[in-house]
Amino acid sequence: MTTYVSRVLRFDRAATRFGGFGFWKPSSLNNIPEASKNDVDEANIVASELEKKLISKEGEDLKVLKSLESTKAIVEELKSKLHGKEDKENCDMNILKELNQAKMNLYKTTEHLTAIRESVELLNKRLEEERAALEKTRERLNSVNAAEISKEIQRLSDDALEFSKTGDEARFAVDNAVCEIERTRSKIKAAEMRLVAGRN
C-alpha cells in the first residue's frame, strides 16, 4: 500500500512539473469529414432499394406459402379420395365374399334338394312295388285261411304306415330345401344390387 501511494505522489509531482493534468483527445477526429447531402441521398436510395427487395422477397415468400397450402390441400384431398376408394374396395370385397358365400350355400342346398328328390323317387318306386305286392297278396289271400290273412293285413298296414311317415318326412325336407333356396336367392339378388350400387 505504501509503495502504491509513493508512486501516485511521484506521478502527481511529474504532471505538475510538465504543465498539469488534461483530457486526451485524438487528433484524427478533427480530420473526419462531415456527411454531405449526396452521401445522405445515396444512403436513402440504398435503403429504399433494400426496402423494395425486402417487400419483393416477402411477396415471393407469401406466394410460396400459398402454393404450399394449395399443395397441402390437394394432398389431403387425394388422401381422402384414396381412403374413400379403399373403403369402397373393401365394401365391394365384402359384398363379393357375401355373394360367393350365398352362391355356395345355394349350390349346397341344391345338391341337398337333389338328394332328397332322389330319395323321394326311390320311395315312390318302393311304394309302387308294395302296391304290386299287395295286389298279389290279395290274390293269394283268396286261397289261405283267416289267420294268415290277418297277419298279412297287419304286416301290410305296418308297411303302409312306415311308408306314409317316410313320405311325410321327405315332403317336409323338400319344402324346407325349397324355402332355403328361395332365401338364398333373395340374399344373392340383394348382394348383387348392393355391388352394382357401390360401383356406381
Image (spheres, helix red, strand yellow):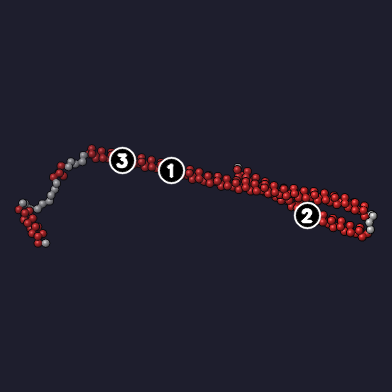
Residue at point 82% right, 56% down?
Answer: 162
Q: Nearer the viewer, residue 86 or 15?
A: 86
The span from disc 3 to disc 2 (Cα, nearest Å) is: 102 Å
CB within 8 Å, label 3 to label 2: no
- The image shows residue 142 at horizontal and vertical percentages of 94, 54
Image quarter of residue 52: top left
Eye-nearest disc, 1 or 2: 2
**Between disc 3 and disc 2, whose residue precedes?**
3
**Between disc 1 and disc 3, whose residue precedes?**
3
Residue at point 70% right, 49% down?
Answer: 108
Residue at point 6% right, 56% down?
Answer: 13
* Residue position for label 2: 169
Numbered disc 2: secondary structure: helix
- The image shows residue 169 at horizontal and vertical percentages of 78, 54
Q: Is residue 56 visible?
A: yes
- The image shows residue 183 at horizontal and vertical percentages of 70, 50
Quarter of the figure with the C terminus: top right
Specify the amino acid type for callout 3.
Leu
* Residue position for label 1: 68
